[in-house]
Amino acid sequence: MYKFIRVDMTSLSVTIGEVPEKYVGLGGRALTSGFVADEVKPTCHPLGKNNKLIFAPGLLSGTSAANSGRISVGAKSPLTGGIKESNSGGSFAQKMAKMGIKALVIEGMPAEDKFYVLKVDGNGVTIDEAPPEIIGGPGNYEALEVLNEKYGEKVGIAIAGPAGEYRLAAANISFKDPEGHMRSAGRGGLGAVMGSKKVKAIVIDDAGAAGVPIADPEKFKAAAKVFAKALLDHPVSGQALAAYGTNVLVNIINEAGGLPANNFTSGRIEHHDNISGETMNANISERGGEGKVSHGCHAGCVIRCSQWYPDKQGKFITSGFEYETIWGLGADAGIKDLDIIAYIDRAMDDVGIDSIETAVAVATAMEGGLLPWGDGEAVLDAVKQMAVPTILGRLLGTGTSAVGKACGLFRVPVVKDQAIPAYDPRPIKGIGLTYATTPMGADHTAGYCISGNILKVGGDIDPLKKEGQIAYSRAMQIGTAAIDSTGMCLFVYFGIADNPDGHQALIDMINAQYGLSLTPTDVDKLGESVLKVERAFNVEAGFNNAHDRLPEFFEYEPCAPHNSLWDFTPEEVDEVFNF
């Protein structure tokens, strides 16, 4: 019923077979990480022939379940040197699932220096030479137009931008959303892996697909209704995110004193209103035109935290204008104009680069004297240089750690060479434990302790104190690994954390689809198993407990306004993965 597709770029051949038995019950992150652990040599060079890139929809992808449209991508990361799963919205996962494709693997690399497009449809996979007009500099927006013209407007597309072609360590993989804009599997440099395989894009056409079989349709429908209601009833997932996007967090985290500013030198800024979600909402509403306050990144999204942000004439600039990007450029790098931040966000989408890694690299470059503090126009120009690429473009695109080394800095906010995101770990201690210990490198989505530390969802744990944080970060990482395996958006947590009916409905949907009888304990065990597989890979790749540490300056530089320090001992940090 389900297919496992391998594309060998060395021989330019395709094998379509049955799903290996050990992967039959897996999806999303559980499948990508399991596969990478099984088939990728942990010590291989991430950009060499022995790395493999895998795309997998989640367990619930392609169904009518709300918010189930995430695609997981896995490989060894060229940024961290460890295992990586990055996921994204768009239409790709749903199309794969409806076509009965459990996974698509890209392995090997071609001898010739030319790029290809993989076309996946009901007849199998064809390997076409990439149109020359999308190679060597043209951005993703232009490339999507060419691919839509060639393959049809309704196809799904995964694409590596110029940053991926040049194998920059922070390059992402972008996915076309239902309206033809882009969503990204941003973190860890998987676009560079795709570029190393000489795959410019993957086009998927699900015309004539049979759809996803459901073992018990009535039970599934009933559970899906309860689940969607749980999401819509919660004030965060049902109201705040739709009105203000993820950028609702600027004012919240700034007030909490945990908004990293000026390369993590303080936790609060004065110009927060300039870049807040409330201001973003007001700009979109007042400008009208092509702007949309609320928008879903994939079909079936009921949270709708995305938006279309327009210029002053109402013309579209960018979509999915996220808190992390706005924080990184607006607070960490000190840019005070939301419009110029939007243009930089668009440029990062166009060149195909992780907006978190790049924004933190920019702030680090400012501290190192390579860019003027708060100069949005200089940053916009620097990002565009990645498509050439210039030396500055290459340096920024290689990530924060490389910038810090090039500038001779010791204040470099990374863990496992991946940039720390938009929550300072000194005054928000739970998220610091996640940054330190997740196998992914610093990643807020790996165990979103902001929920209980700041938003008081799923817990109420004082962010300034150590008590309760170890168990909380552990639980959040386990739960997240399970959610990432279902194909669900991480934000479904708000609808299930304090709602037993919503939580059970999620499990009921899986059981109804596959004819299973999973319990909450089974789901926890799935999350634990994923984390253990990922950590074991990293150990074989050369990581140890000493890599599960935050940068040293957090231990002795207090973060205003609370003047808090990172005060967990190494032994306490190591307790997070004691399960």
Image (tube, rainbow, N blue to C red):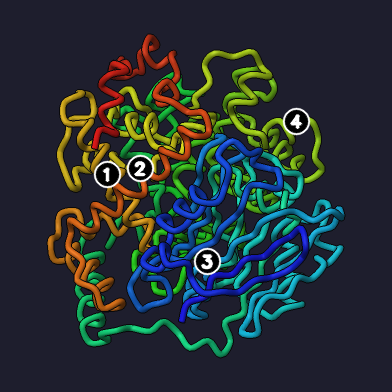
Task: Look at the picture and state if 481 lies above or below 293.
Answer: above
The answer to whether the residue labelled 3 contacts the one labelled 2, judged by CB atoms less than 8 Å apart, is no
Q: Earlier in the sequence, mark 4 or mark 3?
A: 3
Q: Separation of disc 1 and disc 2 at Cα?
A: 15 Å
Q: Earlier in the sequence, mark 3 or mark 2?
A: 3
Q: Position of residue 315 (x, y in %)?
A: 62, 62
Q: Separation of disc 1 and disc 4 at Cα?
A: 37 Å
In this rendering, position of residue 266 left or right of residue 78? left
- Is residue 274 in sight in this rendering? no
Report helix, strand or loop for mark 1.
Answer: helix
Which residue appears at 70% of the width and 69% of the height?
118
Q: Separation of disc 3 and disc 1 at Cα?
A: 26 Å
The quadrant of the image that shows the C terminus is top left
Which residue appears at 34% of the width and 35% of the height?
434
From the viewer's perspective, is the residue at label 1 or at label 2 nearer?
Answer: 2
From the viewer's perspective, is the residue at label 1 or at label 4 nearer?
Answer: 1
Which label sits on residue 392? 4
Report helix, strand or loop for mark 2.
Answer: helix
* Residue type at the position of mark 1: Met
Task: Look at the picture and state if 268 lies above or below 508.
Answer: above
Residue at mark 3: 103
Task: Look at the picture and state if 421 lies above or below 446.
Answer: above
Residue at mark 2: 532
Which label sits on residue 476? 1
Report helix, strand or loop for mark 3.
Answer: strand
Of 257 and 503, nearer the camera is 503
* Residue type at the position of mark 4: Leu
